[in-house]
Amino acid sequence: MSDLVRVEPVALLPTQAGCAVFLGDGSKAIVFYIDPAVGASINTSMSGQQPPRPLTHDLFLLALETFGAKVTRVIIVRVENDIYYARLILEAENEIMERKIVELDARPSDCLALSVRCGAPVFVVRELWDSLQDMSPVLEEMREKGLGFGDPEHG
């Protein structure tokens, strides 16, 4: 998988239009913007909160589990006109069918909401990763200004 870069969410910050998600590999961070509801779902899971009833992403994972499937990884594959595209990789095996791997087109925000719940790794295609600007300085500046709300490293 040398053509992939493993990343993790390093910060979720509110913006006027929704939520900024910073993904990093330890030496570089990228950012994209997501719907505030999905941002809240990711933040809820990352902070260890348990909602009284399953949220949409929880329900999806429960349904997968019921059919013997699980999320094995997420791959962010491309960006077009500032819109990120991802693939959700599922593996299923049950008493009716043999092991099957399924790849679905999905929004990166939904993929992240699922991966933080089940611990599935997140990757970015290396060629894409290398082409994206490092947003670490912007993230540091925001943290210095106290805009770290929702930041998984700092509560």
Image (cartoon, helix red, strand yellow):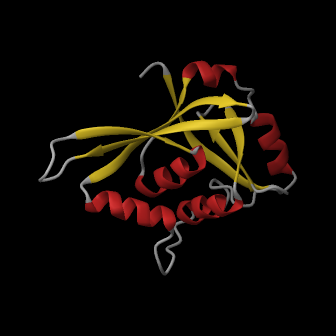
- From the viewer's perspective, tell me whether residue 104 is left or right of residue 139: left
Seen as rendered, the residue at the extreme left is: 95
Q: Quick one: quadrant of the N terminus? A: top left
Give the image location of residue 30, x and y in percent: 69, 35
Q: In the orientation shown, which residue stands out farthest toward the right?
A: 145
> In the rendered view, would you say 88 is above or below 25?
below
Q: Residue at x 71, y 42 (%)?
A: 32
Q: Position of residue 104 (x, y in %)?
A: 44, 41
Q: Nearer the viewer, residue 126 or 62?
A: 62
Farthest residue toward the bottom? Answer: 52
Q: Position of residue 25 (x, y in %)?
A: 58, 33
- Is 105 rendered above or below residue 57? above
- The C terminus lies in quadrant: bottom right
In front of the other: 3 or 11:
3
Is residue 94 shown left or right of residue 150?
left
Residue at horizontal 82 percent and vertical 39 percent from the top: 138
**Quarter residue 102 falls in:** top left
- Residue at horizontal 62 percent and vertical 25 percent from the top: 129
Q: Quadrant of residue 43?
A: bottom right
Above-or-below relation of 151 to 121: below
Residue situated in front as seen by the camera: 15 or 140: 15
Q: x and y percent of residue 124 in the render?
A: 55, 30
Q: Residue at the spot x=48%, y=54% of the render?
A: 114
The answer to which quarter of the image holds residue 47 is bottom right
Question: How many discs mark residues in the rendered view?
Answer: 0
